[in-house]
Amino acid sequence: MCFLDKGSRYQYNFGKHYTNNAALRKGLRGLDGDEVEITRKSEYAVSALVELAQHQGEYVSSKIIAGRQEIPVNFLPQIMALLGAQGWVVGVRGPGGGVRLEVDPALITVKDVIEVIEGPIAIAKCLAGDVACSREGHCPMHSVWVEAQEAFVNVLQNRTIADLVADTPRKYEEGRKYMSGVE
């Protein structure tokens, strides 16, 4: 699977990968045989949204979100900035402040979150959008990749943050201590 940065271009030519975008090269791990996966950053973003959805209408401190969802505290501001840019969350500084979910969690799909964090989802380079492939039109795998991509994206599109809240036990109710020391 590869995730392309929005607006990035990638070209495939004679078995070699060419690009003029360093961020894109970093995001296209796996095209040379390395494993590619949805990053922890996407998982953290989904987990943070689940935590906020469990406290709908309330401001939750970053320390509490990080502790309960096992997200590195220093990484959370980057994630919240991306989610805030979508209008999904809003933050307030100071005592009693924190982060609050601004939209109905039933309106945010897992696919939406992954694409905000990673960019467009593509399980094969030829499905990534602006990709030129020397095998285009005669690749025996193209129909397989299209079917697999549709199934994968369909699963992500059909699961919302609200669905995940319903399926996720609340850790803090189990009485366990977390990284932040919050119970």
Image (tube, rainbow, N blue to C red):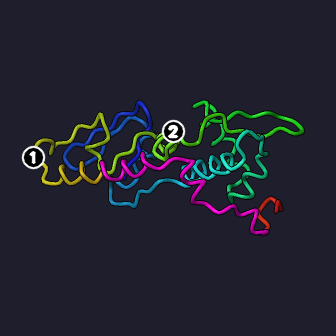
- The range drawn in magenta is 150-176
Which image quarter is the C terminus in? bottom right
Q: Secondary structure at mark 2?
A: helix
Does 155 lie within the magenta span? Answer: yes
Q: Amino acid at mark 2?
A: Val
Label 1 packing within 10 angstroms: few (<14), some (14-19), many (20+): few
Cβ–Cβ under 8 Å for marks 1 and 2: no
Instruction: Name the residue that disc number 1 marks.
Output: 138
Q: Find the residue positioned furthest to the left.
A: 138
Res 121 quadrant in image: top left
Instruction: Name the residue that disc number 2 marks.
Output: 116
Report whether 67 appears left or right of 104: right
Report whether 116 appears left or right of 97: left
Residue 31 in percent (x, y) is at 33, 53
Residue 43 in percent (x, y) is at 56, 53
Res 181 quadrant in image: bottom right
Residue 74 in percent (x, y) is at 72, 49
Quick one: 108 or 2, which is closer to the camera?
Answer: 108
Compared to 51, does 33 lie above or below?
below
Res 6 quadrant in image: top left
Residue 20 in percent (x, y) is at 38, 35
Depth check, mark 1 against mark 2: the one in front is 2
Compared to 117, does 44 lie above or below?
below
